[in-house]
Amino acid sequence: MVVTHNDAKEVQQALDTLREFGPICSVKLYRVSLSLIPAVPIIPCLDHEAMLHQRVDPHASAYVQEQATGDVHEVAFTPASRRIQIDTVSTLSEYSPESHTRLLAWLAAKFPGYEIEVTHPNWWKGDRRVADACRAQVSLRNVLLAENMNAVEADIDRLRTISALMEKQSRVASWTVRTITPLLLGAAGVLTYQVLGFFGAWIGTRAVDTLRLATVGALGAIFLYFGLKAVQLTEMANRVWKRTAEYSLILKERRKLDERRKAPTA
């Protein structure tokens, strides 16, 4: 991955154009350096900074508020692949379907050379459950726009506590699956072979073998399901923690900008 001057220039131009749709509330950057006027909170893109394979193109993702309605959207620009992504997961319940349609049409008109993609909530990843857990404590709108930053910070602290508890629960579930499942599956397999062996004289050896395989397979599928659920719980706990970290960084940057604005008049 090579970061070029053109990447930063194109991202800057794209964000300047995006301001026509509405004010930008915050920007997440991945391997791009730029400064925005007027200044807004700028944080790292946590989703991709944690990936160590270095195969993600430099990009910028902006939280933008529609001028007409105040609805909040997340729009990501990737100049290298000429791609725009609208992430509807991070902004669940922060926009209306009509506002989303207007944003799609506006982007298509303003950026004809870009391919526009929409990221929808994923059931397996538990996107809606993660969003509900976060919104129960603090909304993205408040993190970006609320004037009472102390109250928002208290809400984020509650979310941080919940994310820590979720992480501990996921560890317990993962440990249980790794430790108990092999023992239970082995014991169930032995008992199954012994019990079904008694019926060999009545139903035949081939039928017994078929029942043994079906029973052990069904037990394996059940334990596999619980194993996948443990993995899913771990993934959701990590994503709640990541959302908490993102909110904290945005709030810190908002405080810094607020202090800078007040400094000349102090």
Image (cartoon, grey):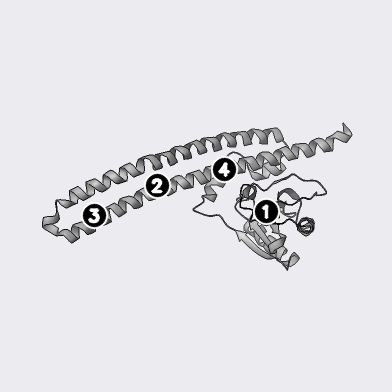
Mark toward the start of the polypeptide (3 vs 2)? 3
* Residue that numbered label 4 is attached to: 240
Comparing 56 with 140, the one in front is 56
Q: Left or right of 182: which side holds 159?
A: right
Q: Badge 3: how crowded within 10 Å, few (<14), some, or many (20+)? A: many
Residue 186 at x, y = what percent? Answer: 29, 45
Measure the alpha-carbon separation of dots 2 and 1. Answer: 35 Å
- Circle nearer the viewer, 4 or 3: 3
Q: What element carries label 4?
A: helix
- Circle nearer the viewer, 1 or 3: 3
Residue furthest toward the left? Answer: 201
At label 2, the amino acid type is: Phe
* Residue that numbered label 3 is attached to: 212
Q: Left or right of 178: which side holds 209?
A: left
At label 4, the amino acid type is: Val
Q: Badge 1: how crowded within 10 Å, few (<14), some, or many (20+)? A: many
Mark toward the start of the polypeptide (4 vs 3)? 3
Q: Quadrant of the C terminus?
A: top right
Residue 165 at x, y = what percent? Answer: 51, 35
Measure the alpha-carbon separation of dots 4 and 1. Answer: 19 Å
* Residue that numbered label 1 is attached to: 73
Measure the alpha-carbon separation of dots 4 and 3. Answer: 42 Å
- Circle nearer the viewer, 4 or 1: 4
